[in-house]
Image (cartoon, rainbow, N blue to C red):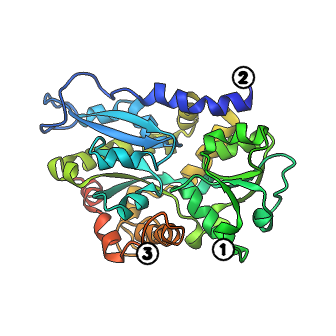
Amino acid sequence: MSKKTRIIGALAAVGLALGVSACSGGASAGGDSGGSGSTDAPIKFEWGMATGSYLATYIALDKGYFADEGLDPNIQVFQSGAPMLAAFESDSLDVGTVGLATVFALGKDIDIRYFGLEGDASAASGLVAREGSSIQSLEDLANGSPVGVPTGTCAMVSAYYAAESIGAEFNDMNVVDVVPNLYANSFESNSIEAGFSWSPFIVDLEDAGSEIIGWDAEWVPGGGSCPETQFGRGDFLDEHPEVPEKMLRALDRAWADIRADRSIAVDALVERLSVSRETAVDVVDRYVDAQPELADLLDPSNRFAFVGDEGLVAQLEVASDAFAALDVIEAPIPLERLQSAVDSSAIEAVVNGE
């Protein structure tokens, strides 16, 4: 199978692998659950996620950790975070996992709350150019060559700050709105010369001969800004306040397994995203090395902290400023709104063994 075919097939593979319930039986969302060993009906809910390298989620699903907690999520996969918003607006999704499309949601006054960190996508996100591209450095971004930038995503935020870092404007670039899982075909057809991408696609493209121009940490303020978070609709979380704690317990077990044996996460990416083992090893190493322990999210000095204003709130603010400047949202999201959207209570409960 060619690299191009493998990348394009990733979305279908994820849909087949994840588009099923995590445990069988049960009715629609409702009722309480006592967690592992409970005889109560599992809590069913709709979980949307963009295509990505969600290591802990994949392992927790594979090992039945959500089922152990009395959870039965039905997972819906989207090409990127932006298309998920309509589903949240219509209350078709209850919980989500994605990068900075959540800021787009807050800008549209969709009531969501963050309760967990899935991973740091910026650890494996950046600018990739096709072999022989006319774009060989950031300085070439404004030379008129077409550049892939998916709207309303972490990649768009990266592109905004990449242009700023060379004294250019975002609009100085010849931007093409295309998602990273289509970059291989776009490179092959010369439709774009380079593109801002996330994992695993950026690493897979490099393995196929494309060139990494640079990584988000080199130009995005704060060392990168693409936290993949677990979040939910306010109404759903109010109705089921136990769901975030149960999800975090399951995910924390999965992270413990991954830290003990990274190869299980490699296997999960190979199976679910149809990437090469070489690509999966690179992606897993980048993610695991960047991932804080759950207790670290309660340390205000951590760049992903769910407490204080220097962690997750700061990263969301960086994205909010970029999206407002690009007219993706009408205005920067007020600091108070960002603060109220970040909820550390579930993390505190799990860390404290409640």
Which label was assigned to residue 1? 2
- Residue 244, percent from left and from top: 27, 49
- Whether the residues at callouts 1 and 3 have beta carbons within 8 Å, the answer is no
- Secondary structure, mark 1, is helix
Give the residue furthest to the right. Answer: 132
Residue 156 rendering spot, x and y as whole percentages = 58, 59
Instruction: Please report contact status of discs 1 and 2: CB closer than 8 Å, yes or no.
Output: no
Residue hosting label 1: 164
In the rendered image of this protein, does residue 342 appear above or below residue 99?
A: below
**353 left or right, relative to 148:** left
User: In screen coordinates, is 221 left or right of 235?
Assistant: right
The residue shown at (42%, 59%) is 104
| Total labels drawn | 3
- The quarter of the image holding the N terminus is top right
> Residue 3's spot in the image, x, y percent?
73, 31
- Write down the quadrant of residue 253 in the picture: top left
Residue at 16%, 31% (x, y): give it.
38
Numbered circle sitting on residue 310: 3
The mark that comes first in sequence, 1 or 3, is 1
Q: Nearer the viewer, mark 1 or mark 3?
A: 1
Residue 73 falls in which quadrant of the image? top left
Question: Tag 2's secondary structure?
Answer: loop
> Which three-letter amino acid code belongs to the residue tagged 2?
Met
* 156 to 79, vertically: above or below: below
Q: Amino acid at mark 3?
A: Glu
Q: Secondary structure at mark 3?
A: loop
Q: Is residue 252 visible in this depiction of the protein?
A: no
Structural distance between the alpha carbons of marks 3 and 2: 45 Å
**First of labels 3, 2 by sequence position:** 2
Mark 1 and mark 2 lie on one chain; the one further toward the N terminus is 2
